[in-house]
Image (cartoon, grey):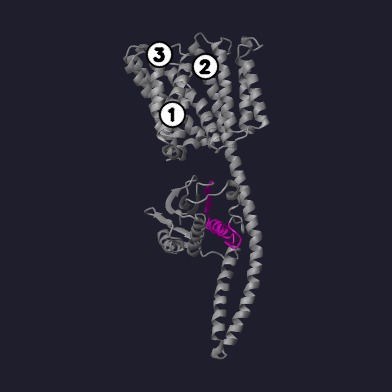
Amino acid sequence: MTTATIDRAQAPIWVRAIEIVVAALVYFALARACLFFASLNASATPIWAPTGLAIALLLLRGNALLPAIIAGAFAANYLTTPSVPTAAMIAFGNGAEAFFATLLLQRWAKGEQVFQSPTGVGKFALIVTAVAAPISATVGILALCATGFAQWGDAIAIWITWWLGNLAGAILATPAFVLWARTIRGEEPAPLVANALLSFAAALLIATIAFSPISPVPATARSALAFLVILPLLWSALRLGLRETATMALLISSFAVWGVTAGSSPFIQQTLNGSLLQLVTFIVSATLPSLALAAERRQSQTLLDQTRHELVQAQKLEALGTLTSGVAHDFNNLLASIAGGLRTLDRQNEERMRTMQALNQALDRGTGLTRQLLAFARREPLKLERIDTNVALESAHGIIASSMRENIRFEMQIAPGLWPVKADRNQLEVALLNLAVNARDAMPGGGDLLIQAENIVADDQEKCIAISVADSGEGMSAETVARAFEPFFSTKAAGAGTGLGLAQVYGFTTQCGGQVNIESAPGQGTTVTITLPRA
């Protein structure tokens, strides 16, 4: 279940009802506008943006909006073909198209994050081309022919028009709707920089000259100019971003449709349907590579930023580790002196036993502190061994439970068949305890602490164990999350923490060949996930 779905489920009933009504009205209006371009058949148009809207709505808000899509599609088609069975079948096909597209995107292509990688863009194109659009086209043509609104002899031509129109609507509209919605929710970079606005203006200028009826260039000389629209799309993909590229493609296609309907486009054919089909094919062929290129650039930039951050973090830890190592060795010399004094005192009379006990306690504490400092400085290597993850987690359960207050509900969920890992068992327990204590301190008024462990397969097909520690506490801002693993960085009051807890977790995880990730937002709790490779 996505966050958007959870938020919607928690909204009042009247808010959800209004959302369904508004979605149905928007779908209806967009459908009626697109049916204006139907010529081969009143119900088959090569321009069908509602497909893109429907897929975006289900991706962003869940299947609860499926009735809105079906209702909007039924009303729009009933006005075109005044037959309840025909309009109902077509509406069913439109709803099934969006449902199965969303289902496959959620399970196979990361849902609304499908456009974040070139592979995701490719999967999206494959799903709408081979699954979603054919469903709607097939159900629609069967409905028209079975009820007499189309002839079986025209079925193939109508099916191709229907399929291509839905395919184009999905590829042109879905990315723009999804990316702008994620921007409004704060999940995408928000500002439109000046060069983006200039790029939009340049793209519209080129589209005006190449396609529009107000172009100063004669229609017979515009065939070559049409290919110039690829330039702003490539520029946007390389220099701006996914959202801007999707928006630019939508703007250019709108101007191109305007030119076709006005009879001044280089794509003019003998019929309006043929002209729009040729235009749609051109626009889709130019848009898909641009989106894939923008996704590739975004993915590369994200990887570069992550590598830089990890390098800076490693340099900080290495510098601090060198300092810590020196302090630890000097401290160790002092402890050796104390130990020598203790051996001398041990030969004295019983009156000094209390002093000896106090010194012994200090020695034990100092020795433990030295060991922790050396481990943090990476001068004392971890004892990596193949450990039973279930046993390690069950052992940590008691330690963590005893550290929690009564107003905190603590639960540990361990998936069956958990794989073993190669790690230092003591340091793993310390890392989990550090995370649990941080979670406890983030919930001064009480709350929920959940530790989950499960087997996962990473993007590179590596088998790993994911251990997540989630709390319902105060959460952290993006700035705090960015600095959370820095040694001695702490948001706690002075004297309430050393600031080494998360640094120890980071150092332990990286030495084991794993990764650690934080997901948090103010007021929404925090989830820290440790990922360790399978032994």
Q: Compared to 488, does 195 lie above or below? A: above
* Residue furthest to the top: 270
Tell me, yes or no, whether the highlighted magenta stretch contains residue 134. no
Is 276 displayed left or right of 241 in the figure? Answer: left
Q: In percent of the image, x 54 and y 33: which residue is there?
A: 179
Q: Determine which residue is flagged by label 1.
A: 18
Q: Amino acid at mark 3?
A: Thr
Q: Indicate which label's residue lies in the foreground, 1 or 2.
A: 1
Residue 402, percent from left and from top: 44, 64
Q: Which mark is residue 278?
A: 2
Q: Circle 1 sits in a helix, a strand or a loop, which is it?
A: helix
Q: Determine which residue is flagged by label 3.
A: 80
* Residue furthest to the bottom: 349
Residue 514, percent from left and from top: 52, 54
Residue 356, quarter of picture: bottom right
Residue nearest the observer in this picture, 129 or 487: 487
- Lower position in the chain sequence, tag 1 or tag 3: 1
Tell me, yes or no, whether the highlighted magenta stretch contains residue 503. yes
Residue 94, percent from left and from top: 40, 24
Residue nearest the observer in this picture, 149 or 534: 149
Rounded to the nearest angstrom, the CA distance separating label 3 from label 2 is: 25 Å
Magenta part of the protein: which range? 492-521
